[in-house]
Each structure stands twice: as C-alpha cells, then as structure tokens.
Image: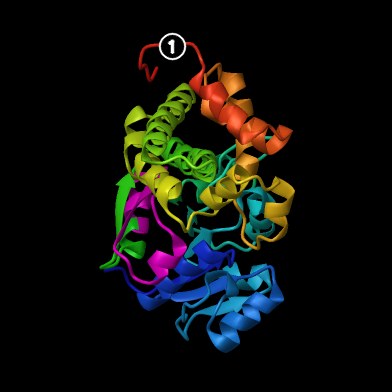
Amino acid sequence: MSASLPIAVVGAGAWGTALAALLAKKGHTVTMWSYEPEIAESINQRHQNPYLSDVSLPEELRAETELALAVRGASVVLSASPSQFVRPVMAEAAGNLADGALIVSASKGIELGSLLCMDKVLDGVLSHAHMQRFCALSGPSFAKEVAAGSPTAVVVAGRTEEAAEQAQDIFQTSYFRVYTNTDVAGVELGGALKNVMALAAGITVGLGYGHNTMAALITRGLAEMTRLGVAMGSEAATFSGLAGMGDLVLTCTGALSRNRTVGLRLGQGESLAEILADMTAVAEGVKTAAAVNELAARHGVEMPIVEQVYQIVNEDKNPADALKALMLRDPKPEDWK
C-alpha cells in the first residue's frame, strides 16, 4: 500500500473524476483541475460531477480552476483531458510541475495533424526528466463502473519499470487491479484504435445486425489494430491484452461506450452533426478515425474497417453501403500480418 501523496488530476471529465475519486478514497490528497468553473463548484460544494452523474464523490476531493494551483507540489500528475486538448493544457502546466513528479496519462486518442499518441505529444511539452517518469494507463474501464467499485483490471505502461511499478502501487485497490507493461506505444495505440472499432460496432447494431456481425467486427478489428501497431514498432502481444482485446471487447459491446453510442445512432440514420450536438462528453473515436486512416496510409497498412468508418464520419457515406463494401472485398486467407 502506497503512502498518502499529493496528486493532481488534470481534466474533470467522467474518467478523470472516477480516477480522482478512487485515489481520494485510497487516502491520497487529490486536487482536480476543471476548465469549467461550474464543474469545479459542483465538485467542491455538492461533491458531484454532472459528467459522472449519480456518483457521490469523496468530500476530501477538491477541484481548482487555476491549473498552476492544481499541479503545483503534486507528486503525481494524472493527465486526463480529451486527447485533442492535452498538448495546450499540459504545456501550460509544465512550468509548475514538481521535480520528480510521476506523469500518468489516461487520455485515449491520437492528436490530429501530428498523428501522435499522448506519450509523444507530452514529449514535446514536458522536460526529459519528467518524461523519464512517464506512464500510460489504459484498459477496459468504464468510468461509471470504476466509480461504483466494480472489479476492474487495467494496465499501466511505463518508460521505465520503476515508474510503472510506482503507478501500479498508487492506483491499485481491492477492486481496481493494475498490471504493468513496458510497451508504452502499444498500450497507447490500443486505447486509441479501439474507439474507432467501437464506432463500427455501434453502426452494426444500429443497422439491426446481431452477434455474428459483432464477433466478426471485433476479431477483424483486432487484426487491423495489431497490424498497425506492429508496423509502428509496438509488440503484437500487447494487442491481445487489456489495452487491446480487453478494451476492444468492452467498448464494442458495452452500452456505456460513448463511441458505440455514436455508431449506433449513425447506423439508425442520424447525421453525425445531430448526434454530436446533443452530447456533452467527448467520443474520441470520431476524430481518431481520421488520424488512424492517415496513419494506415503512411505505414502501408491495410485497415478496411477503419477506412469505412472514416468515410462514414468524414464523407457521409451510407453505413449500409460501408458494410456491404467490407463484405464484398476480395476473398483472402485469414492473415494478421
């Protein structure tokens, strides 16, 4: 059991809040940073966050709207902002980070433009010393279920084994089991790529298809994820673990998945603009689809599911036509390479 530590959670969405609550319940002194003043006020005054409704937060958990105040003096800084905002937010935080602070990323996505996962994004804004103590936390973990204490298993990948083991000790509880890994790139990619597959999974459900279709989608989706990961230098085995297969199964089949929900509504005929207009939380897969489609082209990797999802969300392709295009591709051997 780790000693009590001052911890900053940068980002007050559902996932950041669930992890902040877990850490506070474990006895750590946790300060959250919220971009939205009303969210910080709700956390401080009512011990609730609208992004994680129906969850009572620990009274000891505090929120700040001043980023410098939230991170200053923290032994652990958990980056949990939406992936497209990680760079500017953490660049602002960088000058106030304590020497020796452990940096843990819990954001799952790929930055548009640079096509970088969060470890490489943070490489560009944090010091070399801080990045030597960097970890990525990922795996099958709906925020609402973690906040409710459902038994959950995740993985933390560190640039060093020491950093990963320290993060493991800090986050592990009786209901939140943390495994360590050293394949940072693979763990980060798995967490990002599965969101695109979850969009596809939702689309198949929205079109009215059942378990056969879902099983095919998950299996072939994992093949695409693994191919791209290996082409980018990750270990194939990582995609068979919690950050790959585990998170893929969860987000493709679980009703709490925001990306699956967006796909479901697309499959039922709603436009993407209509869907996003009434969502308060971020569905990372919508923007990640474009980034992954570009990465696949850059690395010469065939990713037909990603290609069709990209065309649906970026080119208004009819979902039924997209599925037909996948099924009518030339026959071939089952090959994951």
- Give left or right: position of 127 versus 153: right
Q: Residue at x 40, y 71 (%)?
A: 22
Give the residues in magenta: 139-167
Q: Is residue 96 visible?
A: yes
Pinpoint residue 253: horizontal percent, then vertical percent: 41, 48
Q: Residue at x 49, y 54 (%)?
A: 257
Pinpoint residue 206: horizontal percent, then vertical percent: 54, 45
Pick the quarter of the image with the N terminus: bottom left
**Is 77 located above or below residue 267 in the figure?**
below
**Is 40 located above or below residue 285 in the figure?**
below
Pinpoint residue 296: horizontal percent, then vertical percent: 57, 24
Q: Is residue 115 visible?
A: no
Pinpoint residue 215: horizontal percent, then vertical percent: 36, 36
- Give left or right: position of 83 versus 74: right
Q: Is residue 119 magenta?
A: no
Q: Nearer the viewer, residue 250 or 2?
A: 250
Mark 1 residue type: Pro
**Is 56 located above or below residue 231 in the figure?**
below
Q: Is residue 162 magenta?
A: yes
